[in-house]
Amino acid sequence: MHLHAALFDMDGTLVDSERVILNAWMESSQELGVPLDPAQYLRVIGLNDEESNALLIHLLGSEAAFLSVRSLAKSKLHAPAGSVVFPLKPGVLSLLAALSERKVPCAVVSSSTSAEIEDRLTRLGVRHYFSAAAGGNEVQRGKPDPAVYLLAAARLGVDAGQCIAFEDSEHGAAAAAAAGARVVLVPDVKAPSAVLASSVHMVLRSLDEAVPLVKTWFALSADA
């Protein structure tokens, strides 16, 4: 099937935020005497706010502990207007420029909220590359459910089966695949299982490696 659009997860794929957020939660939980194990926290990655909050309450033992740790972690992650806490991942600008040159429509598909998507991508100066965005707060079920991917594709006016999707997490890859997209996995803080790696279209070390493939993936859309 011909590819017509590109869909991007945000945290851990476009933006180097997962590692920074993980460290803030580790430090905060340690300081408050309810230390989280990094391996436990990795289970949160790719979930929407509601699901990740429920898991963190369970891991920390109470809602009160969760609220305290979250508050401290947020204070560590707070950025004054115009500043950047989360840098772009390697290869993002090169890949977005290559896709833009070939007039490939792009959308962001994130478990983060719509407001977080707008804020992070605007601060980083890349929001204009994306014709659409879909956040975890806009669907009833987050990743690995395909709803957020289907919403983003619909907003681009394309079938999800005509999209290539860039993801870093297992939940995200499952969501994209369930929507029918061709999945390119670029692992971040969590290495993929052998089963996951074998189930996706390809696994790349960074988005830099995707740049030379754009002409192959979107040869026809460029000539349309």
Image: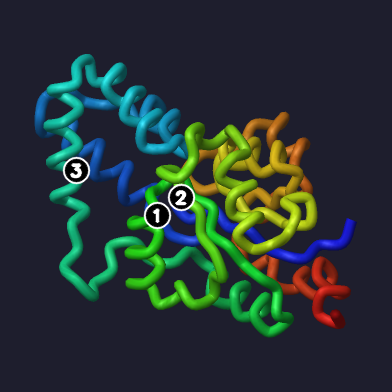
Marker count (numbered)? 3
Residue 4: image x %, image y %?
A: 77, 65
User: Which is nearer the eye, 123 or 26?
Assistant: 123
Q: Quadrant of the C terminus?
A: bottom right
User: Which is nearer the eye, 158 or 61?
Assistant: 158
In the image, which is nearer the foreground, mark 3 or mark 2?
2
Within 10 angstroms of label 1, few (less than 14), some, or many (20 or more) residues? some
Q: Residue at x 86, y 74 (%)?
A: 219
Q: Check whether the beta carbons of the residues at disc 3 and disc 2 lie within 8 A of each other.
A: no
Give residue 95's quadrant in the image.
bottom right
User: Which is nearer the eye, 119 or 203?
Assistant: 119
Mark 3 sits on what residue?
73
Mark 2 sits on what residue?
135
Residue 114's tag is: 1
Q: Check whether the beta carbons of the residues at disc 1 and disc 2 lie within 8 A of each other.
A: yes
Q: CA distance from mark 1 to mark 2?
A: 5 Å
